[in-house]
Image (tube, rainbow, N blue to C red):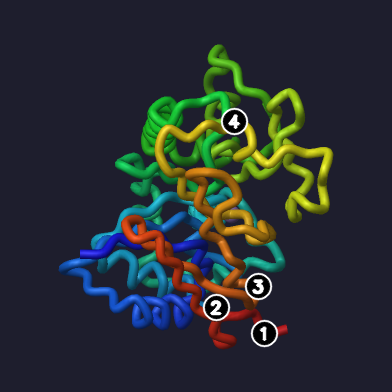
Amino acid sequence: MARWAIGDVQGCFHSLMALMDRIGYRPERDELWFAGDLVNRGQGSVECLDWLRQHPIRAVLGNHDLHAIAVLLGLARPKRSDTLDGLLGHPNASELLDWLLALPMTQDDDHWMSHAGLYPEWTAEQASTLAQETCQAWLAAPEAFFSTMYGNHPDRWDEALNGQDRHRFVVNALTRMRFLNPDHSLNMTSKGSPLDSPDLLPWFLRTRPEKPILFGHWAALPDREPAAQVIALDSGCVWGQHLSAYNLDTHQWVQQPADPKDLAHV
Ligand SMILES: [Mn+2]
């Protein structure tokens, strides 16, 4: 048995299939953890979702997956760079939507995973509880939830936050966070490498992991293991770089070069 954590697929279906060949994936034997951003920007979001739905995977939702949900619900307009038309026109679009809505934002076992990482003012257990509370809120009222999901405020955690503000902070911390300001507020303006933003704090320099933290979302990070027990899985497949797999038990990395067929034709 092997356990592999996979970085941001973003609709790069051919790259994903090549990576599965490389690691010799056998569904009856192996376990796959997906760090979110399963869809969007690549050319094969539908193919990826069809494949993922047919395999016993552990996955978390990323910001692109949440955006896809909002678009499928008719609550957000696709952006110019989105490649969600295949999902919108899919004959089973409502099944794809239900499958996405049922995915969690965290996985918690001997490793902990979310798309963006672990906010330093939360324990892994607390973050998982907040994630579950937030998923329950969108399952109870998807339209109300996803129509108020977007926005950068509040940018600081306070246990007293409630309702939409509380949910928006949890979603942003678990699916969009990269840099923090010195007061631990979320800084949503910079996406680059920490080397280019010396005044800002990557979240993982403040978090003290109780167990290994797996995350995606940050393709510009130059280091796959940027701090102790911090595993950065997004190696920019959709930007023409690599799709990464990390073996949870042997710590081996496998990096599959992006298949050009997956990339936007511009
Ligand atoms: Mn992301």
Could you tell me residue 99's position as x and y percent? 34, 55
Q: Secondary structure at mark 1?
A: loop
Say if mark 4 contacts mark 1, CB within 8 Å. no
Q: Earlier in the sequence, mark 1 or mark 3?
A: 3
Q: Earlier in the sequence, mark 2 or mark 1?
A: 2
Q: Amino acid at mark 1?
A: His
Q: Secondary structure at mark 2?
A: loop
Query: From mark 1 to mark 3, how far is it between C-alphas?
Result: 12 Å
Local packing at callout 3 (Cα closer than 10 Å; few below 14, some 14-19, many 20+) is some
Question: Which residue in the protein does label 4 denote?
Answer: 169
Task: Please indicate, yes or no, whether residue 95 appears anywhere in the rendered image.
Answer: no
Q: Residue at x 57, y 48 (%)?
A: 75
Q: Residue furthest top?
A: 160
Which quarter shows the C terminus? bottom right
Q: Amino acid at mark 4?
A: Phe
Local packing at callout 4 (Cα closer than 10 Å; few below 14, some 14-19, many 20+) is many
Say if mark 2 contacts mark 1, CB within 8 Å. yes
Q: Which mark is residue 43?
A: 2
Query: From mark 4 to mark 3, how far is it between C-alphas?
Result: 28 Å
| Label 3 residue near ligand 1, CB within 8 Å | no
Q: Earlier in the sequence, mark 2 or mark 4?
A: 2
Question: Which residue in the protein does label 3 denote?
Answer: 239
